[in-house]
C-alpha cells in the first residue's frame, strides 16, 4: 500500500470518528433538551430521589432547613459556567445510570474526589463573603459536619 493509500485510509477513519462524535453530541443534545421538560425535570430534587438508593439523602435534604431551598444540582454539579455544567450533568447522569442499572450501587454512597472538589467549589462560591474571612484551607464539611446528608441528624 502506497503513501496515498495510507492517507486515504486515515482520512476515512477521521471522517468516521468525526461522524461518531457528531452523532453522540446530537444524541446528547436531544436527550438533554429534546424531550419536553427533561432538562428542567432532571434538575429537581424529586428527580434525584426517584432512584431508590437516593431516598435517604432526599429525606435528609427535605428535613434539614439549612439548604432546603437549594437543589441537588446546585451543590453537586459545577455552577461556574453553563457548558461545564451541561457536560458534567451528562457525564454524572450517565455514570449514575450505569452504576444503578448494572447493580453496582455501593451500600453507602459517598462523594468521589471530583465530586468533593465540585461541592467545595460551590460552597465557596455561594458563601464567598464568609469564606473571604477564613484563613484556613479546608473542605467546608470538615467544620460544618452537620450539613452532610449522613450527619445532619435526620437519619
Image: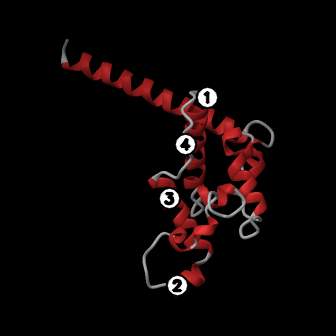
State the residue at coordinates (68%, 52%). Answer: 57
Q: CA distance from mark 2 to mark 3?
A: 20 Å
| Residue 153 visible in the displayed image | yes
Residue that extends furthest to the right in the rendered view of this protein: 36
Residue that extends furthest to the left in the rendered view of this protein: 2
Badge 3 local density, few (<14 within 10 Å), some, or many (20+)? some
Q: Position of residue 46 (x, y in %)?
A: 78, 48
State the residue at coordinates (48%, 51%). Answer: 112
Badge 4 local density, few (<14 within 10 Å), some, or many (20+)? few
**Which numbered disc covers residue 91?**
4
Q: Position of residue 96 (x, y in %)?
A: 59, 39
N-term-proximal mark, 3 vs 4: 4
Q: CA distance from mark 4 to mark 1?
A: 15 Å
Q: Nearer the viewer, mark 2 or mark 3?
A: 3
Front residue of 147/26: it is: 147
N-term-proximal mark, 4 vs 2: 4
Q: Is residue 88 above or below residue 51?
A: below
Amino acid at each position: 500500500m502506497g503513501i496515498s493509500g495510507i492517507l486515504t485510509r486515515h482520512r476515512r477513519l477521521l471522517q468516521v470518528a468525526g461522524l461518531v462524535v457528531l452523532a453522540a453530541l446530537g444524541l446528547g443534545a436531544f436527550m438533554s433538551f429534546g424531550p419536553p421538560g427533561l432538562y428542567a425535570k432532571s434538575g429537581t430534587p424529586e428527580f434525584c430521589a426517584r432512584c431508590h438508593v437516593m431516598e435517604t439523602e432526599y429525606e435528609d435534604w427535605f428535613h434539614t432547613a439549612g439548604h432546603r431551598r437549594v437543589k441537588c444540582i446546585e451543590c453537586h454539579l459545577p455552577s461556574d459556567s453553563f457548558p461545564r455544567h451541561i457536560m458534567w450533568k451528562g457525564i454524572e447522569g450517565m455514570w449514575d445510570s450505569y452504576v444503578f442499572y448494572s447493580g453496582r450501587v455501593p451500600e453507602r454512597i459517598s462523594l468521589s474526589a471530583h465530586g468533593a472538589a465540585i461541592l467545595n467549589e460551590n460552597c465557596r462560591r455561594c458563601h464567598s463573603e464568609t469564606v473571604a474571612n477564613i484563613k484556613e484551607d479546608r473542605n467546608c464539611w470538615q467544620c460544618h459536619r452537620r450539613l452532610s446528608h449522613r450527619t445532619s441528624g435526620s437519619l
